[in-house]
Image: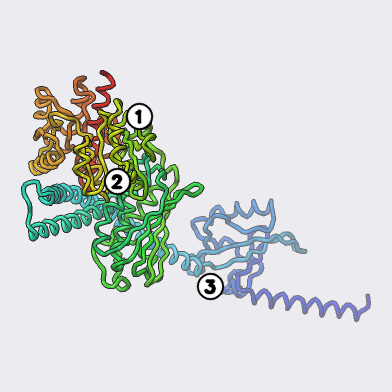
């Protein structure tokens, strides 16, 4: 190698050395080179600054001078172990490492070790990073986290306390509402019942002012009862205490009953209610709650439909559901309010021409009841044109409890001879009320049906038979197998007297309301001759006993009153009783205990028992009552008409059973 080449290599070597020195000094971390025995042979400016030593103070010193005194004694063991296994690695993984300054203070560090080989032998390069700032930041973060966790725990504790307070408030609210239901609804039902009895003028004719006053009492009392029922229903729904009791029933009949109960309100505003549904439409659902859904929707439609408008109630089968709809020609609902229409206590004001009454709970309850059945409800509305509320229920509904399976309503057969729309309405109504209607279009059909079915009654519309009507009736009465069948004649006013003189049990002038027809049938035709049926009434409330006494007497029964279970058992032991009406809430022996006592006695095992109470029940008691009682009516809902109808039906069934045994 030439001399010039050697000088060039020397210059390159010197340049490389200074570049290495520049890099070493520019490094932000402390860099220390240590021999195998731990002697410091090199360090950079960052190391000087980090440890507070001048360079010449550290060169030649053992590395342990930079190690805290608490671990310095064993540090040489770590050096020796590393010398035996020299690999590049971070030091103290999972441990917190500290270094010591010249002044004795300590600070947290991260250290990485790298073995190198040189002409002087094996050495180690240690790169030391001061992580004080990072540790301080982590400490602040941890402090913030701990503070947040403490605050969160305190907040959660407060929320838990508040939740317990809310639960307690809800429990107290429910207890208050239950108490309120008894304290308000019981006297309110008494007011309504006595007002109805006054309206029937059983104790004397009322003058026009008195009838108007009674009408005000009836209307406002029922409105107040609806408000109370709404508040109680939403409370039960929110607390999860509202239970459904599904059964298979004729949906068309339930629709017709609901429409009939609301038709007088519609007629007051000259609103026409159209019905579009199949009379054989059946569904499995909670019948009472199904009617409540319809009642809410139809009454709302009447409320928000101007005079002389129209409402259409529909029911149609689909693949897996049955769709029901209530459509009106009312004021409609603005799109901005349609989403909120089902919210609790929401009342339409600006878009309904000032029509505001009620609690604002009707649609909220309706939506909840539909969804509890597994269905859904929809709204389509155009302001100024009307609204359409449509809800869909599963055809088979919620699973029907086993205790309700096979619970079919008993029916009496009635032969009905006639034709036309009025005839069809009567057929529908009697079917809905549980009667087996044998629809005859001709006299021969009526005769054949009378012979084969042995009907409870025959209803003849003689106006459809033309001039041969009386001969037809006489021919029918002359048949041996028809002489004892009660007959009711539908005829013109001038022929009413002739019908009775020729042997009819009763005659009704056309046109006739189906409900009035059934009332006359029960009173004049289906009633068993002789002493009126004795009905035992058991209730601790005197007002309720008086109300039921008047109600039953007006229907032709003979009430026998008892104020508690013990009196009821004594009355049963000494007097013949045809049926029993009992309350559930009584001091001493409860209504349920009374019913179980009665059913344990073979003498009274078949006596019909009807429960009339203001109290809802849990599912267990409901199942017991379904096995032991024949019918249950809640005072929270209109009950009088169905109550009397059910008693008539139970007594008629008992008569048929006794006759069959004879």
Q: Tag 1: Cα neighbours inside 10 Å, few (<14), some, or many (≥20)?
A: few
Q: Secondary structure at mark 3?
A: loop
Determine which residue is flagged by label 1: 453
Q: Which tag is nearer the camera, tag 2 or tag 1? A: 1
Q: Position of residue 193 (x, y in %)?
A: 14, 48
Label 2 sits on residue: 241
Q: Position of residue 269 (x, y in %)?
A: 26, 64
Distance CA(mark 2)–CA(mark 1):
46 Å
Q: Earlier in the sequence, mark 3 or mark 2?
A: 3
Q: Is residue 15 above or below residue 459?
A: below
Residues 596 and 442: in front is 442
Q: Secondary structure at mark 1?
A: helix
Of 611 and 486, which appears nearest the observer?
A: 486
Q: How many labels, in total?
A: 3
Distance in Å between CA atoms under marks 1 and 3:
119 Å
Say if mark 3 contacts mark 2, CB within 8 Å. Answer: no
**Disc 3 target residue:** 52
Residue 457 visible, this angle: yes
- In this rendered view, identify the residue nearer to me: 442 or 437: 442
Q: Are marks 1 and 3 in contact (CB under 8 Å)?
A: no
What residue occupies the far top of the structure in this picture?
662
Residue 637 visible at all: no
User: Of circles 1 and 3, which is in front?
Assistant: 1
**Residue at 26% in and 60% down:** 267
Q: Nearer the viewer, residue 398 or 554?
A: 554
Point out the tag, 1 or 3, that comes first from the N-terminus: 3
- Residue 526 position in % (x across, y down): 23, 34
**Cβ atoms under marks 2 and 1 closer than 8 Å:** no
Q: Residue at x 30, y 26 (%)?
A: 481
Compared to residue 510, the image places residue 117 above or below, namely below
> Disc 3 versus disc 2: distance between alpha carbons?
77 Å
| Picture coordinates of residue 628, whole percent (x, y) | 26, 29
């Amino acid at each position: 190698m030439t001399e010039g080449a050697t000088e060039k290599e020397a210059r390159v070597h010197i340049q490389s050395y200074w570049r290495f020195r520049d890099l070493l000094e520019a490094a932000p971390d402390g860099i220390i080179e240590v021999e195998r025995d731990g002697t410091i042979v090199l360090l950079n400016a960052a190391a000087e600054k980090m440890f507070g030593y001048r360079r010449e103070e550290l060169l030649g010193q053992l590395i342990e001078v930079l190690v805290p005194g608490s671990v310095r004694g064993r540090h040489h063991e770590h050096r020796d172990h590393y010398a035996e296994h020299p690999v590049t690695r971070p030091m103290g993984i999972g441990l917190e490492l500290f270094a010591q300054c010249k002044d004795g203070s300590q600070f947290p560090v991260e250290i990485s070790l790298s073995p190198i080989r040189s002409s002087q032998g094996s050495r180690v390069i240690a790169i030391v990073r001061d992580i004080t700032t990072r540790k301080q930041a982590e400490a602040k973060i941890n402090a913030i986290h701990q503070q947040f966790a403490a605050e969160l725990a305190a907040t959660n504790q407060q929320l838990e306390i508040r939740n317990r307070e809310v639960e307690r408030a809800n429990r107290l609210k429910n207890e208050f509402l239950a108490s309120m239901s008894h304290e308000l609804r019981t006297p309110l039902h008494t007011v309504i019942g006595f007002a109805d009895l006054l309206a029937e003028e059983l104790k004397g004719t009322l003058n026009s002012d008195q009838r108007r006053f009674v009408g005000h009492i009836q209307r406002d009392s029922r409105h107040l009862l609806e408000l109370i029922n709404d508040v109680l229903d939403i409370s039960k729904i929110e607390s999860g205490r509202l239970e459904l009791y599904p059964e298979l029933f004729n949906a068309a009949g339930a629709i017709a009953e609901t429409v009939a109960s609301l038709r007088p309100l519609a007629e007051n505003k000259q609103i026409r209610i159209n019905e579009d549904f199949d009379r054989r439409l059946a569904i499995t659902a909670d019948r009472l709650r199904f009617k409540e859904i319809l009642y809410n929707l139809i009454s709302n439609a009447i409320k928000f439909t101007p005079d002389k408008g129209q409402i259409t109630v529909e029911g149609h089968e689909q693949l897996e559901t049955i769709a029901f709809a209530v459509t009106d020609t009312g004021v409609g609902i603005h799109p901005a309010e349609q989403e909120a229409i089902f919210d609790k206590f929401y009342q339409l004001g600006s878009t309904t021409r000032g029509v505001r009454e009620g609690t604002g709970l009707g649609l909220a309850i309706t939506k909840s009841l539909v969804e509890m059945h597994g269905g859904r409800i929809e709204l389509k509305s155009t302001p100024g044109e009307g609204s359409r509320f449509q809800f869909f229920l599963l055809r088979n509904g919620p699973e029907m409890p086993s205790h309700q399976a096979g619970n079919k309503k008993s029916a009496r057969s009635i032969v009905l001879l006639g034709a036309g729309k009025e005839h069809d309405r009567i057929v529908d109504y009697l079917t809905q009320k549980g009667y087996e209607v044998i629809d005859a279009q001709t006299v021969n059909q009526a005769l054949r049906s009378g012979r084969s079915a042995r009907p409870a009654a025959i209803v003849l519309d003689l106006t459809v038979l033309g001039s041969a009507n009386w001969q037809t009736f006489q021919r029918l009465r002359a048949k041996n197998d028809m002489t004892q069948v009660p007959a009711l004649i539908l005829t013109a006013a001038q022929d009413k007297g002739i019908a009775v003189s020729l042997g009819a049990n009763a005659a009704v002038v056309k046109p006739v309301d189906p409900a009035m027809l059934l009332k006359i049938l029960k009173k004049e035709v289906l009633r068993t001759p002789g002493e009126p049926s004795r009905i035992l009434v058991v209730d601790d409330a005197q007002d309720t006993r008086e109300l039921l006494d008047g109600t039953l007497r007006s229907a032709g029964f003979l009430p026998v009153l008892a104020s508690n279970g013990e009196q009821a058992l004594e009355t049963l032991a000494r007097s013949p009783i045809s049926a029993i009406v009992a309350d559930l809430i009584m001091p001493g022996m409860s209504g349920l205990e009374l019913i179980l006592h009665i059913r344990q006695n073979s003498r009274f095992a078949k006596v019909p028992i009807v429960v009339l109470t203001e109290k809802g029940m849990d599912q267990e008691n409901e199942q017991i009552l379904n096995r032991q009682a024949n019918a249950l009516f809640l005072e929270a809902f209109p009950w009088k008409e169905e109550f009397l109808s059910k008693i008539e039906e139970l007594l008629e069934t008992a008569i048929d059973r006794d006759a069959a045994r004879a």
